[in-house]
Image (tube, rainbow, N blue to C red):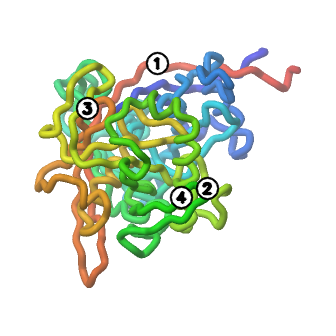
Amino acid sequence: MNQIEIKASFYRGGTSKGVFFHQQDLPKNRAERDKRFIEVIGSPDPYRRQLNGMGGGISSLSKIVFIRPSIRDDADVDYTFGQVSVDKPVVDYATNCGNLSSAVGPFAIDEGLFAPSLRNGNQIVRLYNTNTNVIIHATVPVVDGGAAVIGNFHIQGVPGTGARIQLDYLNPGGATTGKLLPADEITTVLTTDVGVYNVSLVDAATGMVFISAEELGLTATELPESIDGNKHLMTRLDIIRRVGGVHMGLANNPEDISLSNPRIALLAPAREFTAINGEIISADEQDITVRVVSMNNVHRVSPLTSALCLAAAVGIEGTLPQQMARKTKNDLKIGTPSGILPVSADLNCEDGLWRVRSARSYRTARRLMQGSVLIPNDSEN
């Protein structure tokens, strides 16, 4: 055959889409495996459309996940997330995808990797994310022994409704650096080639550089394309992000910082903006307004792990997010380009040390395709 078949499923999880695999169906050698993932997704594509693969031309649609039964006592399945660069032959494993994490439990149930203890109701599936060494409890609605799809829960950025999946991240602080505050301070002054900036560096579920949009002449109400289209600004943001990554201990040099971690978020106190769908989002509907850059593109909503990190940062006295956010005892309502994203985090502080006990979000997920994905068989050339 001039093409190779690989068993796969195509999922929407939250506001992302990705190709899901059983780990046993993949090469053990990482280089060979990554080559297959790159071909499956259709990268690198200088036109940024990924027409020759399953990707969609932006970071939230250029992803893979592979899963196996877990041998851990505290998990049912292990999963690894890969962020495939759109325009480079790179698969980045530096962080997790919170959106696609919502589809791991349903995949495990429907693929027979996990047997529900009930035929109908809410089933907890314990997930171990290998990227960040974090345990996630996914509460998955089950109907007739399979993962439910139909429901009345709506998330911003996805039309229609679906069955609500609850994700509880246990002890997510220091997921990628080993420390909730990797620079050992609440705020950090970054001296870069493009200026001096005041930021907060926080790592909960993923690493984040939080910066006031005002410092960059922005409002955090901009639509993604208006920021993406400003190449000078995007270069500036990437330089700040990379210097922040060095201060977080992720690398010794800015050029060695990965594409996916840390991300950088532009923050502003809650303010009115027009969402991607044309809806007016009032300041009263939000607690904070945010634009997150992921893989050198402004995310159309927010990476879920970034939103969870923001919820944690808002709970830490003195951080930039805490200074800007409206005080709330309920879910933090984040204003994103697609609307409101609610998340929460449970923190405590003992002897001056902050700890995130858990962080929670709600998503929907759906299997869109199942069968095999095809890639060219280079061995026949």
Badge 4 amino acid:
Gly
Q: CA distance from mark 4 to mark 3?
A: 28 Å
Tell me the quarter of the picture where residue 154 sits.
Answer: top left
Q: Is residue 200 visible?
A: yes
Q: CA distance from mark 4 to mark 1?
A: 47 Å
Question: Is 235 left, or right, of 277 in this rendering?
Answer: right
Badge 1 amino acid:
Met
Q: Which residue is mark 4?
A: 195
Q: Are marks 4 and 3 in contact (CB under 8 Å)?
A: no
Circle nearer the viewer, 3 or 1: 3
Secondary structure category for the residue under label 4: strand
* Disc number for residue 155: none
> How far from the left and from the top, in percent, is residue 381?
88, 20
Give the position of the N terminus as an image quadrant.
top right
* Disc number for residue 369: 1
Q: Which residue is mark 3?
A: 273
Q: Earlier in the sequence, mark 3 or mark 1?
A: 3
Q: CA distance from mark 4 to mark 2?
A: 19 Å
Q: CA distance from mark 2 to mark 1?
A: 34 Å
Depth order, front residue of 195/211: 195
